[in-house]
Image (tube, rainbow, N blue to C red):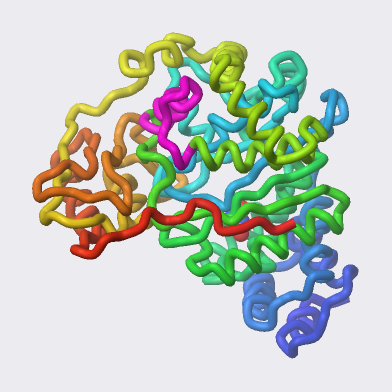
Amino acid sequence: MRMYDIILKKRNGYELSKEEIDFFVQNYTKGDIPDYQAAAFLMAVYFQKMNKQETSDLTLSMVNSGDRLDLSGIKGIKVDKHSTGGVGDKTSLVLGPMVAACGVPVAKMSGRGLGHTGGTIDKLESIKGFTVEMNRDSFLGNVNTIGFSIGSQTGNLAPADKKIYSLRDVTATVDNISLIASSIMSKKIASGADAIVLDVKVGSGAFMRNMNDAFELAREMVDIGNSLKRKTIAVISHMDEPLGLAVGNALEVKEAIDTLKGKGPEDLMELCLVLGSHMLILAGKAKDIDEAREMLKNTIENKSALNKFKEFVQAQKGDINAVDNPDENLPVSKYKVDYNAKDEGFIESILADKIGMASLVLGAGRETKESTIDLSVGIVLKRKSGSYVGKGDTIMSIHGNDEDKIKQCIKLIDDAVIITKNQVQAPKLIYGTVV
Ligand code: URA
């Protein structure tokens, strides 16, 4: 087999066999296929697309390029949750303890990555002492004793995806549905879960900007999961404005803790109830959505989710005072500047991508792999779209450590906030489910 022939076949629009896909994935991972041929291949896939069989073969081949996490030592059905990514998305920090408090083990591998803010594990590092570097035995041990652990992704899970994703990033081949679906699902399958709940975001702050693409991506991932014998379900959720109110690492951890204490924003709580309900049903803990929602709500009311989070923080060597009293024990920025409405009217939108960029400018995220994150900075919304503001009312507050960065951030926020005289409905949070 020659890579040249595989590129030519795809370039001309033909379906690739499992053997051809395997040839590309395994040899590229080993370093036997040069980047220029891999790049040409990815561009051919980008234009000619892959069908369902090819996408499923690509996923499995990427899973087989490295280790699989063996979760068989954990009792019960293991259900994983994955979000395609958005601004202010701290769902895992709330959902994990809620689901674990219902008796479903949550063993979550998370990444750092580039973005508007850090990934889940960067956020958790806002808690003094918190460690995400654990060996496999401690990680699995914590899941067995507490029911919930979040660890940093090991280098050996789906290494083919890591290499291919880096190349896609620099060759304008990221936004192809087959390539995104296989990339996400290869990591989920290698992480060992029995069932998977996907949160596919749609809107200005998401990969998928329009509804058709979001549903298509969801369909593709659900089909891959099911074809590889993992029960998979996808929820399509709103990402035109940030989720919840806080954007920024320590600020999001504080919001997650507030939510576990029953004092969080409504949209974040609702999304956790929706995703969590599917997780409980897939795990066989609840017979239907109504029962699952009730169980999850109880974990907030009786504080079992909050206690689960405390056990989790303690087991991963974090400072428990950060949970009891986040205001005093999480990193805080030097400046806090209010951003006020320039006009009266209804907020039509607070565009998530612009708010994400603004928090990146403050230092909340990484521009390059080498950047250092400032855990204390970010943005906290006081209003969301649909609400009425008078001229001069505070719409959000900016938490920063550098006056010049705050000025740049304000310019971006000027473009993010749209106020209109016409009444605006609050946007829908959930657009549908794909099973
Ligand atoms: N996230 C991934 O893990 N892979 C993609 O291709 C896009 C988003």
The residue positioned 41% from the left and 61% from the top of the image is 204
Q: Look at the image and tell me whether residue 366 can be seen.
A: no
In this picture, residue 386 sits left or right of residue 317: left
In the displayed orientation, state which residue is furthest to the bottom: 12
Q: Magenta includes 262?
A: yes
Residue 242 position (above or below residue 294)? below
Residue 122 lies, in percent from the top left, at 48, 33
Q: Magenta includes 62?
A: no
Residue 5 image-quadrant placement:
bottom right
Residue 9 position (above or below residue 251)? below
The residue positioned 64% from the left and 34% from the top of the image is 293
Residue 211 lies, in percent from the top left, at 54, 68
Q: Which one is in front, 246 or 59?
A: 246
Magenta portion: prevailing SS class? helix
Displayed-image quarter of ligand 1: bottom right
The residue positioned 78% from the left and 40% from the top of the image is 282
The residue positioned 30% from the left and 35% from the top of the image is 377
Q: Which one is in front, 247 or 307?
A: 307
Q: How many marks?
A: 0
What residue range appears in magenta? 251-268
Q: Give the quarter of the figure containing the N terminus.
A: bottom right
